[in-house]
Image: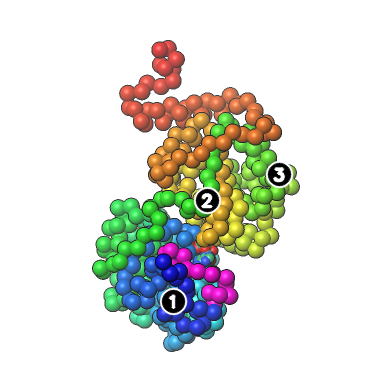
Amino acid sequence: MKEVSFADFKLNRQLLNAVVAIGYEQPTEIQRKCIPVILSGQQVIGIAQTGTGKTAAYLLPILMNVKFAAGNEPRALILAPTKELVIQIAEHARLLAMNTDLRILALYGGIGPKGQIEALQQGVDIVVATPGRFMELYLKGELPTKQVKTLVLDEADRMMDMGFMPQLRKIFEVIPHKRQNLLFSATFPEKVERLAAEFLEFPVRIEVSPPATPAAQVKQVLYLVPNLKSKINFLEYLLQQPEFSRVLIFTRTKENADNVFKFIERKKLGPVRVIHSNKGQNSRINAVNEFKAGALRVLVSTDVTSRGIDVTQVSHVINFDVPIVYEDYVHRIGRTGRAFQTGTAITLANEAELYHVRKIELLIREQIPVNELPPQVAVTETPKEEKQAIAREIDRQKKKEDPLYKGAFHEKKD
Ligand code: AMP
């Protein structure tokens, strides 16, 4: 089979030069499949995870169609669920558009709208926005929509999870009906299917890896670690290894995120920063940018912030605890092993969390290999309170699976 190159697509010189300058040597699978179809004007449902190159798969044809700055009103609109993702998509678009005069604007909440309104008034070609901020600016009369010819919904599954459907419906009403619609989603659950049926006409469905399959380049490992203190000890051990050069650590709660952060800082295993929903907008953006720029070794994050983080060459993802929203596992580990690179995803689970690991394995349709803890790691006795919490949690899980289950007390008597 002949290898496909970017030059095979009907892209202009400006874009081809940008692709070379960025260092993309060949198109990824989703790009090979999507770019010609989108360029031909068809509507597309793209099922692809982060890490597959799906952003450029829709950005390149859009940049090709929009070509150069013209008029003042946006001609393409890209909607994404979180501000981090919006910022990342806009950056990606600016990079690909480096040889053009296109004006690309990111619109998101959490900061005052004034600067965004000023930028809109100066004229834009492509808008990347969260649904909430888009509607807010539209209702203020600051966002002209009549020229929008292409609409992208990125990470549609997450948008549905976050309850954006009513806002999306309103947005569909205020932009021209005759337009090209593109929908991208990491997974394709029923609610996304319904959204697609509502908003796309005769779409071409393009799928690159089965829904909820972790990117193939990610090596996954599971460690059974009985308690919090031992998890911390193990984390310290891991971070003493030099190959852990760029590490993303995910925790389920803000408290754990803060504690892990403080520990790493105290042990001087950073530079490290932490992001979660209690951190201010600027602090979050700065932390991600520092991490991207290589100024941080470790970034600690909760799932709320995990979706939009786009950093290449993450050497390791560490799941300090197991996510209970199972698809978050796929999203978390998708941060390593991005296009054409390999990475390792390490998950730490106590006895109660194993229940969720099994569910995740069902979702990803594979077993996560289990490794023994290295002998250097001190495994401590589980404190009474934590032991009880774990036992209670296991009890709750058993009851959930089997309503007739009577609890550990009865089990003991038997
Ligand atoms: P995405 O799936 O769009 O989030 O992209 C994942 C990462 O892959 C991003 O950091 C992109 O810059 C990178 N990428 C996208 N397309 C290519 C390509 N053709 N070759 C190499 N890297 C790519």
Q: Which residues are magenta?
A: 18-31
- The image quarter containing residue 363 is top left
- Looking at numbered disc 1 in the image, what kind of residue is underneath it? Asp
Q: CA distance from mark 2 to mark 3?
A: 21 Å
Question: From the image, which quarter does the N terminus lie in?
Answer: bottom left
Q: CA distance from mark 3 to mark 1?
A: 46 Å
Dot 2 alpha-carbon crowd within 10 angstroms: few under 14, some 14 to 19, many 20 or more: many
Q: Which mark is residue 8?
A: 1
Q: Secondary structure at mark 2?
A: strand
In the image, residue 70 lies at what x, y percent? 44, 87
Question: Does 125 lie within the magenta span?
Answer: no
Ligand 1 within 8 Å of disc 1? The answer is no
Residue under the image location 26 percent in, 69 percent down: 201
- The image quarter containing residue 341 is bottom right
Residue under the image location 47 percent in, 72 percent down: 5
- Looking at numbered disc 3 in the image, what kind of residue is underneath it? Gln
Residue 359 or 12: which is nearer the viewer? 12
In the image, residue 179 lies at what x, y percent? 31, 76
Q: Which mark is residue 240?
A: 3
